[in-house]
Amino acid sequence: MPGSLVERLAELPDPRSRHGRQYPLVGLLTLCLVAILAGHTTPAAIAQFGRLRQKRLGHALGFKNGNMPCANTIAGLLRKLDADHLDRIIGAWLEDRHPDGWEHLALDGKRLCGSRDGDVPGTHLLAAYAPQASAVLAQMTVEATTNEHKAALRLLDVLPSLGGTVVTADAMFTHADVCAKVVQKGGDYILYAKGNQSELRRDIETAFAAESGGFSPLGSGTVG
C-alpha cells in the first residue's frame, strides 16, 4: 500500500537552523498543503487559515500547545526549501498511485502570478501536467539566461519512464532534440508545426501525402 504524502514529506531535509525550531517541518508543510487545497495560497492566508482552526488542528499537526505559526515563519521556511526535491517527492507519491503510468503529459510554461518585484521579472515555471491525476508531476524554473525549450530538455530528464505516454506541447517545443528526448524516454509526442516552420511543414506534408486527413486543413500540422 503506497504511503501517504505526509509520510513522504518526512524525506525532505529541514533547511532551518537546529536552534529555535518551534514547529516540526512535516507539520508546517502539512498545514501549507491543507490550506492550499482550501484555496489559501499566500503565507498570510495560510497563517490565518491555521489561526481560525487553532488548537484542534495545531495539536493534530504536532505543534506545541497547539499554537499556530505566523506568516513570517511560513514564508521563511518556504524560501529555504529545496523546491526541486519537494517536486520529486510529490511526483514519486503520485507515481505510486498510478503504477500503470500516464496516458498524457502536457508541457506548459507560466509566469508565476504575483512573483514580479519592481524591475525584477517574475518567476517563470515550466510544468509537466498529468490530466489523468489533475496534478503537476514536476516543474522547473526557467532561468532568465535560458528559455522554455532548453528547460524542457532538463524537465524531461527528471521525469520517470514515459512508456505508453503521449507528450503534448505548443509550437515553442517543436525541436528535434525535444522529440528525441521524449522517444529516448519511451514516449510519443504530438507537437504543432506553425507556418513559419516551412521546411518542417513540407516534410510533414510529404510524409503524410498518402494519408487522407493526415494534415490539418487549419494551417497547422502535428509531428508525432
Image (cartoon, rainbow, N blue to C red):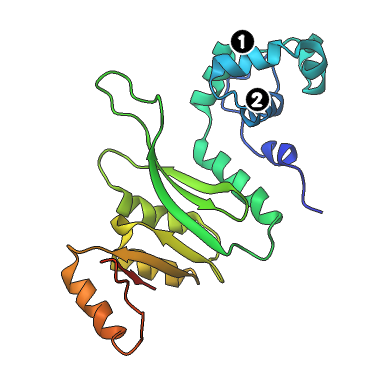
Q: Is residue 80 above or below residue 47?
A: below
The CA span between labels 2 and 1 is: 14 Å
> Considering only order in the chain, which callout, 1 or 2, is on the residue closer to the N terminus?
2
Depicted 27 relative to depicted 151: above or below: above
Residue type marked 1: Cys
Quadrant, the C terminus? bottom left
Q: Is residue 77 left or right of residue 169?
A: right
Residue 36: image quadrant is top right
Camera-side residue of 116 and 156: 116
- Give me the residue at 29% from left, 84% from top: 207
Pick the residue in front: 99 or 198: 198
Q: Which residue is mark 1?
A: 70
Is 201 placed above or below 149 here? below
Q: State the image coordinates of residue 42 (x, y, percent, origin top left).
A: 53, 21
Which image quarter holds the N terminus?
bottom right
User: Visible in this render: residue 19?
Assistant: no
Q: Are marks 2 and 1 in contact (CB under 8 Å)?
A: no
Q: Secondary structure at mark 1?
A: loop
Residue identifier under label 2: 35
**Residue appearing at x 28%, y 18% in the figure:** 118
Q: Secondary structure at mark 2?
A: helix
Question: Could you classify mark 1 by the number of other residues whose Cα lies within 10 Å: few (under 14), some (14-19), or many (20 or more)?
Answer: some
**Amino acid bearing label 2:** Ala
Q: Nearer the viewer, mark 2 or mark 1?
A: 2
